[in-house]
Image: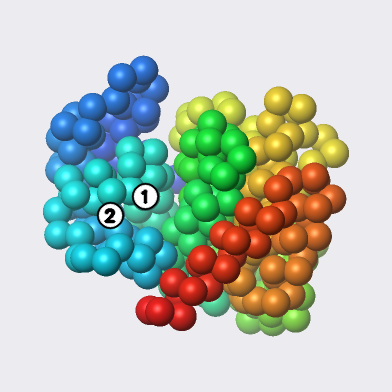
Amino acid sequence: MVNYISKKIDALPPLPKTVMELQEFKRKDVQEITELLRILEKDPLIMATLLKVANSAMFGFRHKVETTKKAVELIGINFTLSIAFGSAVKSTLNTNLDAYGLTSDQFLDLANMSSNILNKWVAAWDYKLKEELLLPVFLQETGQFILSDLAREYKITNNFFEAIKKDPIKIADIEKQLFTMNCSEVTASIFEQWKLKDDLIAMIRAVNEINKCDPKYLKHAQVLGVIKVLCNPVEPLSSKSVEKAIDMAKTYKLDVKSLEKAIEVMEDRLLDA
């Protein structure tokens, strides 16, 4: 199975040229909004996704965001880059997510929810860490596209979905059992294939193997793991998911009060919507 997954990853098309330009932009010490807009305007799909996300209940802006420039100004450059990468990944992989009970739009909604919770939670106690995690938290479930496609080919889509419905807290274990690799491992392998940054790959690969994590990325992987449970595809923000996520945060000695506040804000926004 591992070899089969590797072959599927090796056969993936390259990311669009726009993403390569965005990667170069992200590496710059001085990032100008005008340059970012110039890159984004080359890809109408990314611009449409950006406006859709900016106008979603997750952000809770009072007035409709009507231009890409306004969206970038409101949500910030790093958030914009995360959404742009997520949109490009979704369109590049271009397969269904039936095994996880999701549409591709719902996949982006969960990624957006994850990013917003990260923003509200981690910015309260470590702004630098929050900035470093905006991209990986948005992209960490990318491997779902490969695993869902694999489930379809092996005709186990329904069996897999029923298994994760019964215990959404243990999705990574179920993935490992059925596919020999969990989503975090697959995502890291995809990003290696696309030659994305080593630190991004290291953080995501360690999410379900905290004990093997490079100390440099330990806190990164812990935060990603908490949010992965909290925003799981089966029952995001359910009482069970929240309880488990808070227990994990306590175990990792992360700030629990700000996590509870972030969850409360997100729940309020979703209720208002």
In the image, residue 220 sits, relative to residue 240, either above or below, namely above
- Left or right of 51, for residue 174: right
- Left or right of 118, for residue 215: right
Residue 107: % across, % down: 47, 65
The residue indicated by pointer 2 is 50
Q: Can see residue 211?
A: yes
Q: Within 10 Å of the Cα at label 1, are there few (<14), some (14-19), or many (20+) other Cα atoms?
A: many
In the image, residue 152 sits, relative to residue 225, either above or below, namely below
- Left or right of 188, for residue 257: right
**SS at circle 1:** helix
Q: Nearer the viewer, residue 157 or 174?
A: 174
Residue 201: % across, % down: 59, 35
Residue at position x 37%, y 28% in the image: 26
Residue at position x 80%, y 46% in the image: 252
Using the numbered discs, state the Cα–Cα distance from disc 1 to disc 2 in whole angstroms.
6 Å
In the image, residue 239 sits, relative to residue 135, either above or below, namely below
In the image, residue 12 sits, relative to residue 216, either above or below, namely below
Kind of residue indicated by mark 2: Leu
Quarter of the image where one finds residue 101: bottom right
The residue indicated by pointer 1 is 83
If the image is split into quadrants, where does the C terminus sit? bottom left
What numbered label is drawn on residue 201? none
Q: Within 10 Å of the Cα at label 2, are there few (<14), some (14-19), or many (20+) other Cα atoms?
A: many
Do the CB atoms of the residues marked 1 and 2 lie less than 8 Å apart? yes
If the image is split into quadrants, where does the N terminus sit? bottom right
- Nearer the N terminus, badge 1 or badge 2? 2
Q: Nearer the viewer, residue 220 or 61?
A: 61
Kind of residue indicated by mark 1: Ile
**SS at circle 2:** helix
